[in-house]
Amino acid sequence: MIAKTLARHPRKSAAVLVAAAGAAALALSVTAPTAHGATAGDPSQKPTVVLVHGAFVDASSWNSVIKRLQRDGYPVLAPANPLRGLASDATYINSVLKNVKGPVVLVGHSYGGSVISQAAAGDPDVKALVYIAAFAQDKGETVTALNSKFPATNLGAALNPVPYPLPGGGTGTDLYVKADKFHEVFAADAPTSLTDLAAVTQRPVSASVFDEKPTEAAWKTIPSWDLITTQDHAINPDEQRYMAQRAHAHTTEINSSHAAPLTHPGAVTRVVEQAAHTTTR
């Protein structure tokens, strides 16, 4: 579809891709929406769904969810979350949102929840937040502090720290999930053929994100939905429940590992669409 559009309208299509803030994974709805999320000529547009992935995966982790949303007529964007730091990641996602016209349903998986909580603050077009096995911190609350309130999961012991050079000098630390632990910790209900590949292609997250204090908590002013994964070995399910209750979120629980977008895309899509329906009433 993208190739056809480029062939017919090369200048316009290039502008469309730039307007999506250089997102590495850009998904367009089958109803041919503009880059700003509105279906051309449709006065009753559906909200644009913006999907923000978390640590250890990339935007392709949303592929099965994207297909379902597109089938149901939703414009979709799945930008690349840089995973370099909460403030910078949220600033980038906010820049993506600024290029979307009309109502937005903003969805975050895992650490992506931290990012959307900050990125959506003050944006009147974000009508709903959806947390998928995700963090939803309060202002000034780090992931480390939040995790300390609940029994530890298997994730901490499964992480492999790797140093990397910082642009301004000095050394940062990237965190990967050890390949032989990826299936157990991240997606125990997925086929090993899938998790073996995901372990190799995983995107690391900067260790700094766990101790960075959010300056915003958009769930305090924007209605939220929360999908809790009861077999999660990365974020304690009770921790997820605590955050959902605090946010007064519409809550759904499923028997899933942490990787719900991969292993239960139907359930994820249903929660996203529940949130989306409230924006068109």
Image: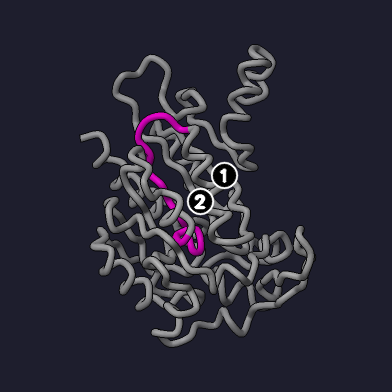
Residue 178 falls left or right of residue 27: right
Magenta stretch contains residue 182:
no
Left or right of 132? Residue 165 is right
Which element type, helix, strand or loop, lies under badge 1? loop
Q: Residue under label 2, please give it.
A: 52
Residue type highlighted by circle 1: Pro
Observer-nearest residue: 123 or 158? 123
Q: Residue at x 50, y 82 (%)?
A: 153
Query: Where residue 227 appears, x then y in whole percent?
Result: 36, 61
Where's residue 207, x and y in %? 63, 71
The residue carrying pointer 2 sits among few (fewer than 14), some (14 to 19) or many (20 or more) residues within 10 Å by Cα, namely many
Which portion, as a residue range, is magenta? Answer: 100-114
C-alpha distance separating marks 1 and 2: 6 Å
| Residue closer to the observer: 264 or 136 | 136
Q: Are marks 1 and 2 in contact (CB under 8 Å)?
A: yes
Query: Seen in the image, is 64 located left or right of residue 101?
Result: right
Q: Is residue 275 visible?
A: yes
Q: Which residue is mark 1?
A: 79
Way the structure is coloured: one colour
> As rendered, which of 120 and 13 lies closer to the eye?
120
